[in-house]
Every structure is written in C-alpha cells, then in structure tokens.
Amino acid sequence: MRATPPPNDADTALIERYLEHVRIEKRLADRTVTLYSLDLARLARWAAEARVALPAVQNHHVRRWAAQMHASGRSGRGIALILSGWRGFYAWLGRQGLISANPVQDVRAPRQPRPLPKALGVDEAVQLAEHVSEADDPWLEARDAAMVELLYGSGLRVGELVGLNVAASDGAQRAGRGWIDLPATEVQVQGKGGKRRTVPLGRQAVAALQRWLAVRSQSEAVLHADSEDAVQALFIGRRGTRLTAQSIWQRLKRRSLQAGLATPVHPHMLRHSFASHVLQSSSDLRAVQELLGHANIGTTQVYTRLDFQHLAKAYDAAHPRAKRK
C-alpha cells in the first residue's frame, strides 16, 4: 500500500502566509486562527492524498472531501464551518493571483435536519390544563387557566393570544385583533401575514373563558378603565393593560412548575402539543394545517415525525420483539 505523502513545502508556506494574514490584517481571535489552522491542515492532507497541490484543487475534490466528512458523522454545521474557512483561503489565493476560480465557491454542506419541536405528552398536557393554583388569587387563577386552555386547546400562537379581544368590532378588524365568540364556540385570530382563521373552542376552553370573563368584568381595572384597549383586551393585568407575550411566558412557566411538570413550559410548546395530539388522534394532516394556520403543508409535516416518535415509543414499550435482553 502506497504511503500518503505529507503536504509539500509550498502548500505549507501558503497556509502559513494566509494564517498570518488573518491574524495580522483581519485581526481574528487566536481561537479562530487555531481553528482555521486545523481545518487547513485537513485540507492539505487530503490534497496530498489526491496528489494535487492546494492551488490546483478542483471543485470535484472539495465535493468529495465534504462527502467524506458527512459520511464520517460530522454535522452539517461543522462541515459548513470548515467549508467557510476553506472558501476564505481560496478567496485569498485568488487575490494573490494564484488561482483563477474558487473551488469551494458553490459547495454547500448537507442540510441539517430540522429539530423536532418540543411537545408535552398527553398526560403532562392534561396535568397542566387541570392544575388549580392555590398560590394565586381567584382572579389570576381564572385568567391563567383560560390562557392555558386557548394555547393548548386551540393551538394559538402567543402573539395571537395577546391580540384577542372579548368581542368582535370594526376597531378590532382594523387593528388586526382577534376575538372570542362563545355562542359559536369559536375563536377568530389573525395570524402571520395578516391571515385570519377560525379555530374551534373545546368545551373546557369555553368553561374556562366563562369563568375568566365573569371575574374580569368585575375587576377594578375594567370598571374604571381609562382606555378602549383595556375594555376590549381579553387578557389583561391588574392595571388593566393588555398582557404582553413576555408576561404570558412568565406566567406559563410559573404555572407549569406549580403543576409539577419536570420541564418549564412555554406557549409554543403548548401549540406543538396541540398539533401533535390532534394528529395522533385524527391522522388528518390537512386539518392540523388549517387549525394551525400554516400556509405550507411542509411546515405542518414536522408533526408527523413527532407522531412517529410516539408510535415508536409505544412499540418499544409493548412489542415483545422490540424489547432488548
């Protein structure tokens, strides 16, 4: 077997000149320069294996080496960082007049798989929805319970929840607000891109909203409100101002910890849970797309992966041939 020759002196000298350039002229941090040095050393080794000098490296060489990194298990992000360093090196060689084209210019790293959204299990979601906080007064408890029911029961985005009014109005339409319609058991929301959609309200959500509206209407903040928004906003604070998304994040995190959940819950986690649980029960991807207000079915398809995870776990737990000795 023929031994791989070491990088030639000319290639080593080019790398050293480039590293000096990025260290002195570009003033990159020592850590960055070290990473560049390691990545360029890898490039030089592969070029030596291919019996080609660094200035003679071609696009097909770089593609093959990127594929090798991917096959060895390196992440797409890691490959992208290495290619970026190589691309900068060859751009510098071009400015020196040593190459006519950058062989890394159109090489891209493999696309990273989209991370799965975090969703609660059904039991955890029900545990949160049925939790009654003894630490809060009835006003806060009623309000926060209604927020949880809308986030989990209807799959609303936190921005959509913030924008809800107690009733429909011309002003709400103009301001891009949504509203609840209890007689029709529906919530009207305005989502991304100004698109409106109608989402059904479940029985528990209707009951929670009725309890909240009863105490809300008697609060000092509403009885003595000095702004129209305070009167119309569905979810308000003690001072009568419409709740912010940040406030809802904080209240939900607090409530999930009070309910004994291991992981602090944020609003979008409840939206993910809504979508995942509806899909598990119905297998109707188009219906979930409509409920979530996704413009593209591809955005909704990520929940099929969550659904498969759920099925895989059930299989691993129940099937006798799935259990390891």
Image: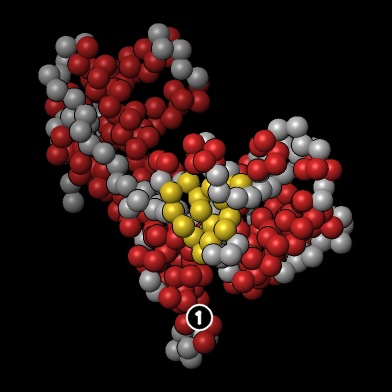
Residue 80 is left or right of residue 121, and the answer is: left
Q: Nearer the viewer, residue 230 or 190?
A: 230
Residue most extreme to the bottom: 320
What residue lies at 75% left-to-right and 32% top-to-bottom?
226
The x, y position of residue 322, in whole percent, is 46, 84
Residue 220 is left or right of residue 206, and the answer is: right
| 318 w.r.t. 77: above or below | below
Residue most extreme to the top: 25
User: Element at badge 1?
Assistant: helix
Disc 1 marks which residue?
314
What residue lies at 82% left-to-right and 61% top-to-bottom?
133
What residue lies at 40% left-to-right and 8% top-to-bottom?
25
Residue 31 is left or right of residue 46, and the answer is: right
Residue 109 is left or right of residue 203, and the answer is: left
Instruction: State whether residue 41 appears in this view.
Output: no
The x, y position of residue 113, in whole percent, is 37, 53
Colouring style = secondary structure
The x, y position of residue 240, in whole percent, is 76, 39
The x, y position of residue 204, in whole percent, is 65, 70
Instruction: State whether residue 105 appears in this view.
Output: yes
Q: Nearer the viewer, residue 15 or 138?
A: 138
